[in-house]
Image (cartoon, rainbow, N blue to C red):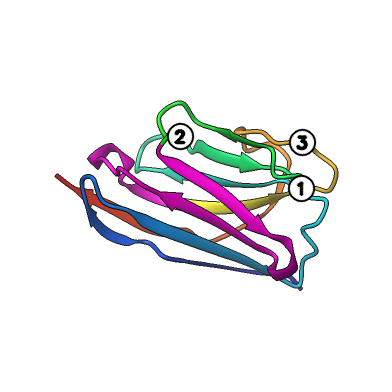
Amino acid sequence: QVQVAESGGGLARAGGSLRLSCTFSGLNVDDRAMAWFRQVPDNEREGVASIGPGDYTIYGVSVEGRFTASRDNAKSTLYLQMDKLVPADTARYYCAARRPRLGVTLLAEGYEYWGQGTQVTVSS
């Protein structure tokens, strides 16, 4: 049984940094793309970053150059380093693992396992 655990959310000031972690226990992620999404109430879920098995990564336009996704397959863990935070980054952040052998995408389609989300709040 796969269990997904996220950590690292919290409160930061504009210009600051936070690092999110997400571990997929019981899941081999070697051939899976993984991703971060975020959502604010009454808005659609937004793709933030998607990283493939070979570390090829795509980013949403609003975070490009500020956020960095990485992965440690041996630990089945996904990371998101968030720098130069702005209040618009305030959201609940979700990690996800896609079905095997599918490519990276910032759309929610094909993501099989999801975390419960961790809140990130950025103050001005």
User: Is 55 rendered above or below residue 11?
Assistant: above
Query: Which residue is nearer to you in this view: 112 or 27?
Result: 27
Does residue 82 belong to the magenta stretch?
yes
* Residue type beneath disc 1: Pro
Label 2, secondary structure: give it: loop
- Comes first in the chain, label 2 or label 3: 2
Q: Position of residue 21 (x, y in %)?
A: 52, 63
User: Is 3 rendered above or below residue 40?
Assistant: below
Q: Which mark is residue 53?
A: 1
Q: In the image, which residues are magenta?
A: 66-92
User: Is 16 rendered above or below residue 67?
Assistant: below
Neighbour class for label 2 at 10 Å: few (<14), some, many (≥20)? few
Neighbour class for label 1 at 10 Å: few (<14), some, many (≥20)? many
How far is the residue under mark 2 from the one under mark 3? 22 Å
Please give left or right for residue 68 compared with residue 114 in the image: left
Label 3, secondary structure: give it: loop
Q: Position of residue 50 (x, y in %)?
A: 62, 40
Give the residue drawn at x 62%, y 33%: 107
- In which quadrant of the rendered image does the N terminus lie? bottom right
Question: Residue at label 3?
Answer: 103
Label 1, secondary structure: give it: loop
* Residue type beneath disc 2: Glu
- Comes first in the chain, label 3 or label 1: 1
Q: Quadrant of residue 62?
A: top left
Question: Residue at label 2?
Answer: 44
